[in-house]
Each structure stands twice: as structure tokens, then as C-alpha cells.
Amino acid sequence: MNRLFSEIPGASMWSSVEEIHKGWSSDKKYYIQTTDGRELLLRMANMVHYDKKKREFEAVTKLDHVENLFMSRPLEFGICHDGQSVYSLFTWIEGKDAEEIIPTLTAAQQYQLGVQAGDALKKMHEIHAEQDRVPWAEHYNAKINRYITNYKSCGIPLKGADQAISFIEKNRHLLENRLQTFQHGDYHVGNMVVNPSGELGIIDFNRMDYGDPWEEFNRITWCAALSPLFASGRIHSYFNNHVPDLFFRLMALYIASNQLSSIHWAIPFGKEEVDDMVQRAEEVLEAYNYFQTYIPKWYVPSYSDL
């Protein structure tokens, strides 16, 4: 047995360990098969991240009692590799990448998967944050300030950035008195799978946090670029087909902020990644007519062709 894993309980029963190279996380990820036919997901990180990884694992454990939520379930957390690494062990969920599957489906099937995505998110948001957290407006306004400062100092032009910043400034007041709940932290099609029976599964909780549940729609732009029907179905089901106007205003605020932050975020990954993020951000801003509106062009108000 590889000494990386030898201290993990049950590792002697692992018949196959295969490293997974997908995703942006710095974690090492492995697909595991056991001698008794089980499939597992192992995540490993440097010991310096122990507190953060413990917090993540404990937070995901809070979801373990949520029924009808298709996700990797937490199994075990601890230290291995002679005290150099921290590990988290989960059940494996079978499925193909939603990004690959959704474009091959009918319009009705795309919408229905979006409905599943909205239902799953609503269940996660039933877990409320502890009461001692910093008020959301204070927390997120600090983020906005940082995003704007970083964008202005990075020297990379983004068409529509001035309009986005103006929209953000005019709508900051909407952040007051927002509820805080569990957040997946990176909720979009890239972190979803579809199993052979058409069930949508949620993966990669390593960016989990607590905050305004509606902030989870800040990355729905990735869903909308792939399938406006999927993205719209996600919104409809989350709100039981009664979407409040305030939601669209806040979603636009979060999306505008996210586009500004994405430019600075991409810089360490090189020019190609920066160019890609600029192009994506400009497409997102164009979908909002450079914030002359707060309801994006891709949104489908209703869909009944099922």
C-alpha cells in the first residue's frame, strides 16, 4: 500500500486508486475501488490546510441527513502521510459530466435537469448559518470594494465594466438584512454529473461557505451559456415558479461583481485564461445589456413544453 494512504482506515481494502486531474482545486483527488465493490472519492491536502478542510467536512456532514439529495456523502476525515496530509473520504457518485450531457438532450430534458438543480440547491439552503456571523452587507460590501480595486489596478480593460460598477454602487443597499445559509460555493454545471437514469448529482463542495443563499446564482452564467432552459429551470424550481423581482436585482448584483473579480482571478493562470475570462465576462455583461436591465436576455420566463 502506498505510504500516502496507509494510515487511512480501510485503505488495505482498496483494490484500485486512480488520480483525478480535473478541476481547479489544489486538492489531490482520487477515485477508489474497494475489494468489496464500493466506489469512493478521496481528497487530500497539505496539513497546513487542516482547519479549513475540517470545517468543509463538518459543513458537508450537516447535509448528510438531507433526503433525496444526490451528492457525495462524507465518510471519514483525518490525518495521513506521516502527519503531512489531511484527507477527506466520500462516497462516489456515478455519472457523466453535466457539461457534456446537457447539450445532447432535448429542450424538455434540459429544463427538467435545471429543475433538479434548483430543487437540490433549495435543500442545501435549509441549513442555516450560525447566528454569530458578520452581517452579510458588511461582509459582501468588503468583497465588492476589493473586487473593484483589484479590477481597476489590474490594467485589463473589460467592455461594460464602468456600467457594471455603476449598477453595483446603486444596488449595494439590497445586501442589507439578508439571511445566511449553507452555500455550495461553486454551484454550476461544471460541478454536476448526470447518472444513467437521468438524475442530477452535485459534486465538489470544497468551496463551501455560509452567506446569502441567492449569491449561489452568481455562477449561473456558466449554466446559461450551455443551456438557457437549464438555467431558467433552476430558477423556476428554486422559487416554485414564483420568482420575486428582488431576486433578479440581487442576482444581477452578484453576477456583476463576479465578472469584475474573474479578470483579476485569472491573471496567475496566464494570458490565455485572462483572454477567455474577458470574453466570457463581456458576453455576460452583454446579456444584461450592460446593466440597462437586471433580467438577463437568456432568462426564459416560463416553459411548459414537457
Image (cartoon, rainbow, N blue to C red):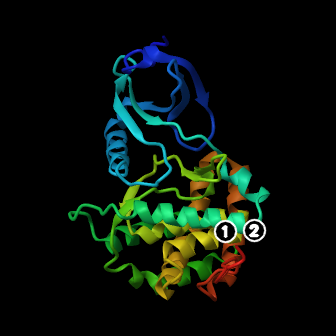
Which of 70/292 is in front? 70
Q: Return the residue at label 1.
A: 111
Vertical order, 97 against 75 (above or below): below
- Image location (x, y in percent) of residue 137: 34, 74
Residue 128 at x, y = what percent?
30, 63
Task: Tell me the kind of residue under disc 1.
Answer: Tyr
Q: Decide: is 83 above or below 214.
A: above
State the image coordinates of residue 1 (x, y, percent, origin top left).
48, 10
Q: Is residue 157 visible?
A: no
Q: Who's the residue at 79% across and 56% down the image?
A: 104
Using the rendered view, name the quadrant where residue 285 is placed.
bottom right
Give coordinates of residue 33: x percent, y percent: 55, 24
Query: Dot 1 surroundings within 10 Å: few (below 14), some, or many (20 or more)?
Result: many
Which residue position is annotated with label 2? Answer: 107
| Residue 211 in the figure: left or right of residue 155 | left
Mark 2 falls on what kind of element? Answer: helix
Cβ atoms at labels 2 and 1 below 8 Å apart: yes
Q: Residues within 10 Å of mark 2 (few under 14, many from 20)?
A: some
Instruction: Assign a secondary structure to mark 1.
Output: helix
Residue at 56 percent of width and 62 percent of height: 116
